[in-house]
Amino acid sequence: MQKYIESHIVDEFEGWDGDAEYELDNGSKWELVSYTYSYSYSYRPKATIWRDGGKYFLEVANMNDKKEVRQV
């Protein structure tokens, strides 16, 4: 797995929510591949997109795991 993008979430992050779109400072937008829900609030947290083959994973500061995402 290698780093693909390092950035910050634009505005508020309220955890993983299956129908949420996550926008990064660089303008890219990402959504979860499969539904998951876990609440955690932070303002403009650091976000890293990881690439593993053809799959992408979003890691957000203060969350314990990476979630698979696709670019919107």
Image (cartoon, rainbow, N blue to C red):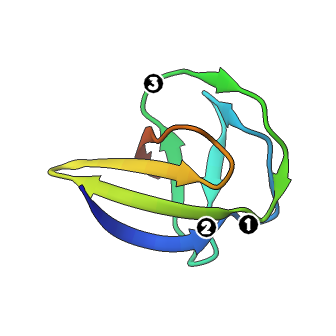
What SS does tag 3 mark? loop
Residue flagged by tag 2: what amino acid is it? Leu
Q: Which residue is mark 2?
A: 24
Residue flagged by tag 1: what amino acid is it? Val
Per the rendering, the mark at residue 10 is: 1
Q: Is residue 31 left or right of residue 62?
A: left
Give the mark, 3 or 1, whose residue is nearer the N terminus: 1
Whether 30 is drawn above or below 40: the answer is below
Residue flagged by tag 3: what amino acid is it? Ser
Q: Which residue is mark 3?
A: 34
The residue depicted at 65 percent of the width and 55 percent of the height is: 61
- Residue 5 image-quadrant placement: bottom left
The residue depicted at 61 percent of the width and 67 percent of the height is: 24
The residue depicted at 23 percent of the width and 55 percent of the height is: 1
Rounded to the nearest angstrom, the CA distance separating label 1 from label 2 is: 5 Å
Q: Residues within 10 Å of mark 2 (few under 14, many from 20)?
A: many
Q: Residue furthest bottom?
A: 26
Whether 13 is drawn above or below 49: the answer is above
- Residue 3 image-quadrant placement: bottom left
